[in-house]
Image (spheres, rainbow, N blue to C red):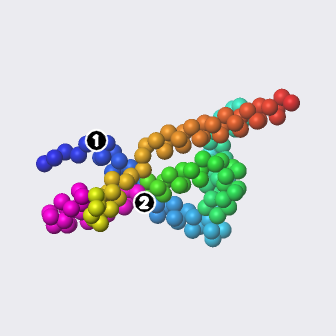
Amino acid sequence: MKKEPVIQNREARIYRGCLILLPVLALFVFLSCQGYSIPAQLLPPCLFHTLTGFSCPGCGCTRAVIALAKGELLASLCYNPGILYCVVLYLLFVLSHTAAYISAMIIKKLPSRLQESLQREKSLLHLLNRIHGMKAKPMYLYALIWLFLGFGVLRFSVELWQRFH
């Protein structure tokens, strides 16, 4: 039996975790739309803000998630623009991997001569092969890290400027 590469196993585990998280997030959005919210006393305070008095790159994430769940897109962007990017990245990851897994299942069920036609560019079935290879890339995660850091540095600079002027 052929062993799958470690990267594919890790990617499959992340995908399954994302699928498990999907109904939890949907329930959170549903409850937020119904007017239910998490009491602020249950959430831990930001340790960086508590110790320094300045906002960290992640400050505003909880408020941004709650605003986004209520459908307040602009408020969410004001609290922390990285959250919207996280949601888009999460949906892109789940949708692209779901499409890839479904197309892989379809390809496996095709007769062998049809599977051979997948290799030809002019075949309509070639689209299945293209979907199968279309998955979200890790570079989006690196861009997310830089977005958080950039936003945090910008916000820190503004707070520092306001405090000393």
Q: Is residue 113 magenta?
A: yes
Residue 156 falls left or right of residue 119: right
Question: Tag 1, which secondary structure?
Answer: helix
Q: Residues within 10 Å of mark 2 (few under 14, many from 20)?
A: some
Answer yes or no: is residue 75 visible: yes
Residue 13: x and y in percent read 34, 50
Above or below for 95 versus 14: below
Which amino acid type corresponds to the residue marked 1 in the rendered image?
Answer: Val
Q: Quadrant of the C terminus?
A: top right
Q: Residue furthest front?
A: 122
Q: Which residue is mark 1?
A: 6
Q: Main secondary structure of the magenta part?
A: helix
Residue 160 falls left or right of residue 103: right
Q: Residue furthest bottom?
A: 34
Question: Tag 2, which secondary structure?
Answer: helix
The magenta region covers: 95-120
Q: Which residue is mark 2?
A: 95
Residue 77 falls left or right of residue 4: right
Q: Nearer the viewer, residue 4 or 120?
A: 120
Residue 93: x and y in percent read 44, 54
